[in-house]
Image (cartoon, rainbow, N blue to C red):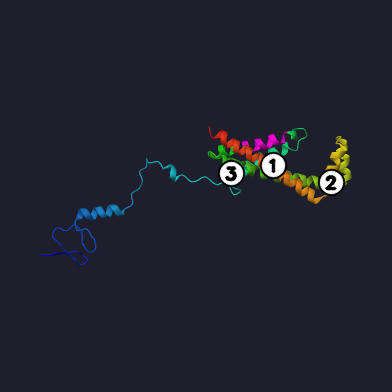
Amino acid sequence: MPEFCSCGAELPPDARFCHKCGKPQRESDVQFARDRETPQAAPANVLPRADDAPAPMPLTFQNPVAIRVGFSVASVAAVLTMIPFVNYGVPVWLLGAGFVSVFFYKRRTGQRLSVRSGARMGWITGVMSFAILAVIMMFALFAINRMGGLAAVRDQMTSVQMSQKDMDEVAATLQSPLAIVRFMASIFVVWTVVPMAGGALGAKLLSKD
């Protein structure tokens, strides 16, 4: 007597699967199909692959660790550039700021930066250092206006024995908005390019650890 599948198809003798719907006809095949459909949990002693690790955050102003590290280092660099005699080493402090920011970022995150990423970390630090310096200069200009304007500036420069030529250049800069913009633009270039070089150097040297 012929056998039929639950779908109504007539099965050939000793058939293991229905040729119409594919349903298994033997108990062992039914259990095998159920096991394949049940998801298997990963063994407890299997470690996740390196490919499964979360990707590092990009070095942008939306990276909170980069912002904290950059601001901390930039604050120190900005203060050093405002101290008399110490400010003669501005290129050194800015280069060191980029290097140190990469060092602390690597220490906080455990991430090894490429030369390009190190330069970006140095750039972030340089931008923040310039922003801090710009705020300080704005307060200085406000204080100058409160104290009497250019006359007070000339008296201050005379007290530190500044040459007449330098005093004239400072006075001309303060009287010309365009000169102030050009001065700030040149400061921005120096304050960002030098830390970028320091960051790239830091990434290159620290990657050997």
Q: Image height check: is 86 above or below 130?
A: above
Residue bearing mark 1: 191
Total marks shown come to: 3
Q: What residue would you read off at disc 2?
A: 172
Which callout, 2 or 3, points to the residue nearer the camera?
Answer: 2
Kindly state the secondary structure of the residue where label 1 is placed.
Answer: helix
Query: Which residue is painted at 62% across and 43% down in the image?
Result: 68
The residue carrying pointer 2 sits among few (fewer than 14), some (14 to 19) or many (20 or more) residues within 10 Å by Cα, namely some
Q: Is residue 98 magenta?
A: yes
Left or right of residue 31: residue 76:
right
Tell me the distance, in whole angstroms, between the alpha carbons under discs 1 and 2. 23 Å
Q: How far across and how far down the image is residue 58, in percent?
A: 55, 47
Q: Residue at x 72, y 36 (%)?
A: 90
Mark 1 and mark 3 lie on one chain; the one further toward the N terminus is 3
Q: Earlier in the sequence, mark 1 or mark 2?
A: 2
Residue 11 is drawn in which quadrant? Answer: bottom left
The quadrant of the image that shows the N terminus is: bottom left
Q: Nearest to the eye among marks 1 and 2: give it.
A: 2
Residue 160, by quadrant, is top right
Please state which amino acid type lies under the numbered disc 3: Val
The crowd level at tag 1 (other Cα within 10 Å; few <14, some 14-19, many 20+) is many
**Residue stretch rendered in magenta on the structure:** 89-99
Name the residue nearer the viewer: 187 or 53: 187
Circle 1: residue type: Trp
SS at badge 3: helix
Tag 3 residue: 65
In this view of the protein, which residue sits in the foreground, 182 or 87?
182
- Position in image of residue 186 (x %, y %): 73, 44
In primary-sequence order, the first of circles 2 and 3 is 3
| For residue 152, side relative to residue 125 (left or right) | right
Q: Position of residue 17 (x, y in %)?
A: 20, 59
